Image (tube, rainbow, N blue to C red):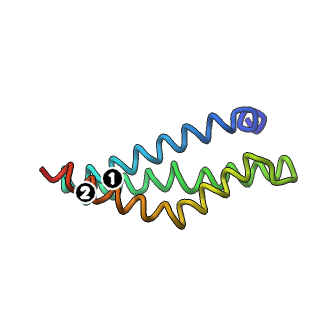
Amino acid sequence: MYNLIMENKWAILLILEFFAWSATMFMFYARYKMQSQFWFKVASMILVLTGVIPQVLLGVVNFVATKEIDLFTLVIVLLIVYGITIGKKHVQKLDVWAKKRFSR
């Protein structure tokens, strides 16, 4: 299993990013269109479970396996830094767009 993860780490990262952004969009849809606190919370949990946690774990596993900061580990670190800094502003802009789009 470990070798399978390491051999497909880029594909796994892309899939995780896709699910994380899909969860983000569903979170906005649940918040503004469905107006459902339950589905908003579900989407938030999906976001955490597909975005933050597995990506950090994938970066740690890669670092432990390679014993160095390679391109993959650097990309993971940059994604985390982006999410903590500039990404917050982008999500706020996306939130404004989603509110306009889904509140019709």
Seen in the image, is 73 located left or right of residue 56?
Answer: right
State the image coordinates of residue 37 (x, y, percent, origin top left): 25, 60
The residue under label 2 is 31
Residue at 53% from the left image edge and 44% from the top image edge: 17
As helix, strand or loop, the secondary structure at mark 2 comes to helix
Q: Name the residue that disc number 1 marks.
A: 27
x, y percentage for residue 53? 58, 56
Q: Nearer the viewer, residue 70 or 67?
A: 70
**Whether label 2 touches label 1, CB < 8 Å:** yes
Crowding at mark 1 (Cα within 10 Å: few <14, some 14-19, many 20+):
many
Inspect the image, locate mark 1, and give the three-letter code of the amino acid beneath it.
Answer: Met
Give the image location of residue 22, x and y in percent.
40, 43
SS at circle 1: helix
Amino acid on which disc 2 is placed: Arg
**Residue drawn 61% across and 51% down?**
55
Whole-percent x and y of residue 9? 69, 38
Q: Quadrant of residue 96?
A: bottom left
Query: Could you give the CA–CA distance between mark 2 and mark 1, rounded to whole angstroms?
Result: 6 Å
| Residue 14 vertical placement versus 24 (above, below) | above
